[in-house]
Image: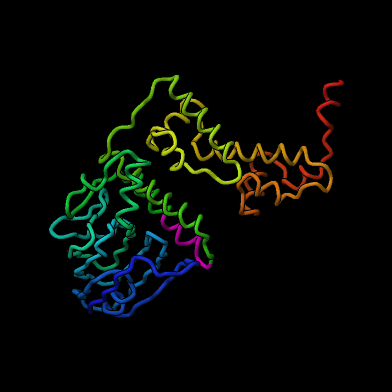
Amino acid sequence: MTTNLSTLSPPTAACRVETSVAHDADEQARNLHGWTQTYDQLTAGRFVGRLTGLHLDDMHVFCETTSQSLRQTCEVPSDAYWFGIPAGDEGTGRIGPQPIGRDSLAFQRGGVEFELLTPGGYGIFGVVVRGEVLHRHAEAVEHADLIDRAGQTGVIPIDTDHKARFCALLAGVLDDTANAALSERARRNLQTSVLSSLFDLCASTSLEPVAIPARPRRQWIVSEARDYVLANRDRPVGVPELCEHLHVSRRTLQYCFQDVLGLAPANYLRAIRLNGARRELCGAAPGERTVQDVAAAWGFWHLSQFATDYRKLFGVRPSETLKTVHPPASALLAH
């Protein structure tokens, strides 16, 4: 059975996780939207296939499991790339003549038909990303080329520990976003997180080593990042935006922050905004501001997440800080 859908993502404002269960190979092929493909069942027995997927604006993340051995002829849209990561160590799949081992992932450019052989009980995570988005992320954020090193069709060697973490991330993405509508910003951040983790997955074997700036340059990068975040306090500045602003790769930015502060960039940037919000809460006169007002002013639009992060950092809820009477600075100086 062949299914032929040209779009990578359905035009919907609220992207949700969809799960389907199929009882024959044809039905399984139909359930994987956005592909041109044919599934042939090779081993005898009742077929059960499960597919859980999330369509984002420029990316499709999914997990597929099938109970019987299959020969699959597949083709993703011409403007996209597919990455396939075995979900476990049960059996060995193949892309064309090449085995997809536990220390590798499969890769294919869009618009080209390829063949997959998967054994019974096989599970695989898939990431399909629009080519323009992947190339822009590689150039502006990673400063590393993943596609040229992957070849036309085949496999990319990966570290097994990184693979386990990446699979856990994808499983979490599919689990955490189930039954939850995602805003445009949330979808964009989620796509960036998956792409960054995908590059990390391949970094130990496929990508260039991180560039290490001199110590003064490292300190300048951290200082400039802080200034930029404070200048744009009303919205969350992400690591990709900082990389573009500072003209450094994500891995270089991570190294600088780890070396200078002992923290990951995202953790530090969140802490800067949380501290700013705390100062405003402390300085607010009774009835002058609400927690929601202050959170929004510092780019925290998800109020419950803001409260969770705030309490984790400071040990109290933001509402408790707001209710506390803080003496003015002049009174403190008088003592």
Q: Classify the position of the N terminus by image quarter.
A: bottom left
Side of 276 where 32 appears, left or right? left
At 50% from the left and 65% from the top, the residue drawn is 178
At 24% from the left and 62% from the top, the residue drawn is 78
How many numbered marks are there?
A: 0
Quarter residue 116 falls in? bottom left
- Magenta span: chief secondary structure: helix
* Residue 146 locus on image (x, y percent): 26, 45
Visible in this render: residue 91?
A: yes
Residue 171 counted in the magenta span: yes
At 65% from the left and 37% from the top, the residue drawn is 275
* Residue 51 locus on image (x, y percent): 37, 69
Of the pair 33 and 134, the residue shown nearer to us: 134
Residue 263 counted in the magenta span: no
Of the pair 178 and 123, the residue shown nearer to us: 178
* Residue 284 locus on image (x, y percent): 78, 41
Q: How are the residues colored?
A: rainbow
Quarter residue 310 falls in? top right
Question: In this rendering, is residue 253 above or below 85?
Answer: above
* Residue 302 locus on image (x, y percent): 61, 54
Q: Which residues are magenta?
A: 170-179
Of the pair 102 and 98, the residue shown nearer to us: 98
Question: In this rendering, is residue 324 above or below 50?
Answer: above
Visible in this render: residue 161?
A: no
Of the pair 118 and 189, the residue shown nearer to us: 189
